[in-house]
């Protein structure tokens, strides 16, 4: 990896065109911007209306956690004294400093990114919180934005609330199609501003389960430089990779190969590997963009919970980076086995009735129902939302993941929670729902010994 002094980064003024009007007009918090000065030695602070810690009833917090190297063993960790006092009090907007420092080290270890390259880290109430804020500080109402399609359904309302023009970039089993992205950008009308951001989920994409190949990632980064946009790298399944080949480097790591860094804003989540309910995520990227996000935080929820950050730091610090790596490898192997169980049921019941690609990361199968063309134009909506639910199984029709809506024969199914027997029952019920719809459509097709007739796709 390049030495820290050899890494060129884009200057702060470069990002002026990427900051939304609302973010530029947001006035800094007069109190929160001065909080760091309280730490100057010898300063007596009369600044903030912090409650006195002596009035807090909590004196000690202990919790037990499984060992990352031996899940049968548990250790008890205790937070008390100054650690607990910091966790119970208002804290810095960007995050709990010990945890921030730990995350800086993690990004160095996993992505080769070191301090001094023009980037920083900010904590959020889950990565969704940070994505929402990032979009609002970068996108103006009515802007055109690039989004892979299908896309994570949770971001669609964020863009819709800003009345954005969602430009759909095609995807397939190898992730985002850089050829589609190039065509969009090269054919962009000369009288319209080009999109400032591209939103993508490169590992185990929700909903498709696809993981972007190295070649495509490099091409997308090249296009970001050529057409001047920021990549919003939403990567909650980075640690849930269970493919046979070594894990591809992130956009955040790959941009070190570019002439200068600063075109990637990365979002990580601890929800899938530590706890979804603890609501901790972090963003890593250009200082100017993260500072704008911090200003948003200062005027919305002030900060991410100090206490949950202190708990997470206590656990991660006890594990060390090696323990964290071991834990995430165990989690990814757990989901690989869940994937295999689900796919076995799909082969058993859906062969000839659906098509799919095997995911290498994440929690989802994205499969195409082979339905009659004269029923809902091959749409999965009735089959899944009505027929399958009547039979006792719940999944999501693919239309919910299309940025601009519309019919689609695809379905998203999550395999993260369901046991093997229920998986078998669920997929069998989906089969029955498909057969019912095909029969209505005049496709009494014989599939694995059922319902004779001519094939109809």
Image (cartoon, rainbow, N blue to C red):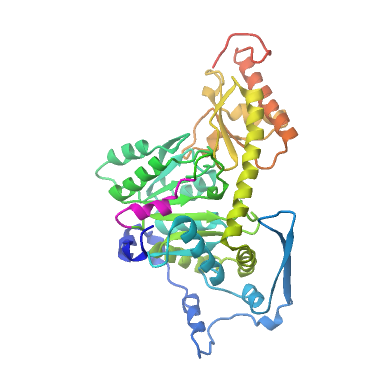
Any magenta on residue 255? Answer: yes
Marker count (numbered): 0
Whole-percent x and y of residue 223? 32, 45
Tell me, yes or no, if residue 441 can be seen here. Answer: yes
Whole-percent x and y of residue 137? 42, 59
| Residue extent of the magenta highlight | 247-260
Quadrant of image for the C terminus: top right
Q: Quadrant of residue 352?
A: top right
Residue 26 horizontal side relative to residue 386, left or right: left
Q: Nearer the viewer, residue 403 or 90?
A: 90
Whole-percent x and y of residue 210? 50, 38
Residue 9 horizontal side relative to residue 265, left or right: left
Q: Quadrant of residue 189?
A: top left
Instruction: Establish if 68 lies above or below 352.
Output: below
Instruction: Establish if 298 lies above or below 148.
Output: below
Judged from this view, the residue extending furthest toward the left is 190
Quadrant of image for the N terminus: bottom left
Q: Residue at x 66, y 55 (%)?
A: 69
Any magenta on residue 19? Answer: no
Q: Nearer the viewer, residue 433 or 8?
A: 8
Residue 49 horizontal side relative to residue 215, left or right: right
Instruction: Establish if 181 lies above or below 113.
Output: above
Tell me, yes or no, if residue 271 can be seen here. Answer: no
Whole-percent x and y of residue 175? 45, 38
């Amino acid at each position: 990896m390049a030495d820290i002094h050899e890494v060129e980064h884009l200057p702060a003024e470069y990002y002026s065109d990427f900051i939304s009007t609302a973010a530029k007009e947001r006035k800094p918090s007069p109190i929160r911007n001065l909080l760091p000065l309280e730490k100057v030695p010898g300063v007596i602070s009369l600044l903030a209306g912090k409650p006195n810690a002596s009035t807090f009833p909590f004196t000690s917090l202990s919790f037990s956690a499984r060992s990352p190297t031996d899940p049968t063993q548990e250790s008890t960790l205790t937070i008390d004294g100054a650690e607990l006092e910091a966790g119970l009090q208002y804290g810095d907007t960007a995050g709990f400093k010990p945890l921030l420092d730990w995350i800086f080290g993690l990004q160095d270890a996993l992505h080769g990114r070191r301090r001094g390259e023009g980037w920083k880290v900010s904590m959020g109430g889950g990565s969704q919180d940070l994505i929402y804020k990032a979009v609002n500080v970068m996108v103006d109402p009515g802007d055109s934005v690039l989004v892979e399609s299908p896309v994570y359904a949770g971001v669609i309302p964020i863009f819709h609330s800003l009345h954005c023009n969602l430009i759909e970039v095609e995807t397939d089993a190898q992730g985002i199609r850089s050829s589609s992205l190039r065509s969009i950008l090269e054919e962009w009308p000369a009288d319209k501003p080009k999109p400032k951001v591209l939103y993508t989920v490169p590992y185990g994409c929700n909903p498709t389960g696809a993981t972007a190949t190295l070649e495509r990632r490099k091409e997308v980064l090249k296009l970001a430089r050529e057409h001047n946009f920021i990549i919003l790298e939403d990567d909650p399944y980075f640690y849930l990779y269970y493919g046979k080949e070594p894990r591809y480097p992130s956009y955040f790591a790959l941009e070190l190969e570019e002439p200068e860094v600063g075109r990637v804003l990365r979002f990580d989540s601890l929800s899938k590997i530590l706890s979804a309910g603890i609501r901790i995520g972090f963003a890593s990227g250009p200082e100017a963009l993260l500072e704008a996000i911090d200003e948003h935080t200062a005027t919305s929820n002030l900060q991410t919970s100090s206490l949950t950050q202190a708990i997470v730091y206590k656990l991660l610090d006890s594990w060390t980076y090696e323990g964290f790596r071991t834990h995430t490898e165990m989690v990814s192997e757990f989901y690989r086995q869940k994937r295999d169980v689900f796919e076995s049921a799909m082969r058993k019941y859906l062969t000839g009735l659906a098509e799919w690609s095997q995911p290498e990361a994440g929690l989802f199968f994205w499969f195409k129902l082979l339905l009659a063309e004269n029923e809902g134009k091959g749409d999965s909506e009735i089959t899944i939302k009505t027929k399958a639910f009547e039979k006792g199984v719940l999944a999501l029709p693919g239309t919910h993941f299309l940025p601009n809506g519309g019919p689609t024969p695809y379905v998203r199914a999550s395999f993260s929670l369901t046991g093997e027997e229920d998986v078998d029952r669920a997929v069998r019920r989906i089969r029955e729902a498909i057969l019912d719809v095909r029969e209505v459509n005049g496709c009494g097709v014989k599939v694995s010994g059922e319902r004779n007739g001519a094939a109809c796709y």
